Image: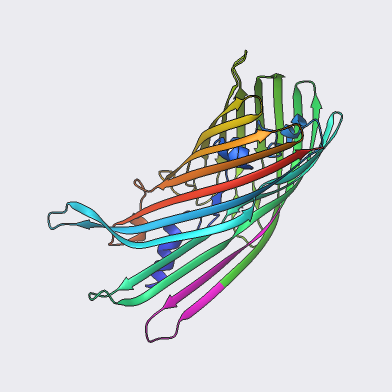
Amino acid sequence: MLLLTIFLTGLTLPGVSYQGDRIFYTDARSMSLGGVSLVLESTDNPASITLFTERAIRISGLISVQNEDRGLRVYDSFGNNIGIATVASNTGTYLNPGNCFVVFPFRMLRLGLEYAPAWDYNYTYYEEHRDDFYQIVRIDELTHRGYAHAITPVIALNYRSISIGASNSFMLGSRVMERTVIIPQLSDTVSSDETNFNGNSIKLGASFIPAINFRMSYSYQHKYQLTDDGHEYPAVHSFGLMYQPPGRIPTRFLAQVEAEMWDGIFSEDIFIYKIGIEHMILQKYNLRYGFCVFPDYQQDVIWTTNLTLGFGFQTGLYAFDIGYCYGKRDYLASDYAHLELSENYKLDETAHHFMISIGMQF
């Protein structure tokens, strides 16, 4: 049973024992706009830091609440599905710093330094096994903790409406796995494993801003490996647009498409779609909402849908933003045939992300 639990967890839940879930947004503003970041005043696209005309600093904090329900499809004697019997319901809450950066402008030159989490490895699995008399005969607990972080120096040049930039991310982090098996009247079985890793990733970016109401950006991140992690992360092509109708319409429409070029046992390419709308009120307050959807990198028929919402305000020197994201992973079209399991599992995963960002120009 223990081996089956580990095998099932590792192969059917994206991110448990593989790369983890990508963090598809940067700060709270990006989160509330569906993850759009290339055309914003941020360091996600190296060329975008040319949008800062004053020295700027920003710090963020992130709270993630993840929930996974695992059930068995129940059938009657005629083969009709009559419901779902819940096997396990697992919830975990995690705190982590969000995107933080500082930017220094020097005429046509911009220099910046960024910290950002890149991959999320957190996951909690808990399952109780009971006999025919509803007495507990076994409890399995499996916990994964950790992030892959990036510390990134950024440089960019601006000439009129064109900007180019480059960055080199120094990746580091750890992943800790703890497994506990509890059987009544027997000693508990506890095991743990920790992996520390590091590496670096290069990103190039370009922005074209011909008018105040239009922006277009592109970035390319080269594929990279993390030492001792054992996996190769994909090359990523990203393209973003921002458009604000001319006149006095205080609404911005933003979109971003990313292509992740996976190799090996994962899908060869994955497309991520991000859409956001930012409505400005009195040129000071901002109401934002957005949408992001992406497939799993192991089975591209599994999609994760994210609905986002946020609010922010900005004065001459200070900015405050808050973002919320609700994500749901759809397993309806997933294929478990390779597991050769007699049970017909149904998985239901949801996530709630909250982020606050505070910025200052000086």
Residue at (47% x, 75% y) in the render: 180
Horizontal placement of 219 versus 19: left or right? right
Residue located 66% across and 59% down the image: 173
How far across and down, in percent of the image, does residue 202 sit?
71, 44
Q: Nearer the viewer, residue 150 or 261?
A: 150
- Check the image and name the residue furthest to the front: 282
Q: Residue furthest right?
A: 106
Magenta residue check for 172: yes
Q: Viewed as shown, does residue 102 lie left or right of 250?
A: right
Position of residue 18 relative to residue 249, above or below, is below
Tell me if residue 339 can be seen.
yes
Residue 248, by quadrant, is: top right
Q: Residue furthest left?
A: 78
Residue 258, x across and y down, in percent: 57, 36
- Can residue 13 be seen? no
User: x, y percentage for residue 235?
Assistant: 62, 42
Where on the picture, by quarter, is residue 278? top right
Residue at screen point 49% across, 47% down:
297
- Colour scheme employed for the rendering of this structure: rainbow
Horizontal side of residue 165 vs 261, given as left or right: right
Q: Nearer the viewer, residue 281 or 68?
A: 281
Q: Quadrant of the N terminus?
A: bottom left
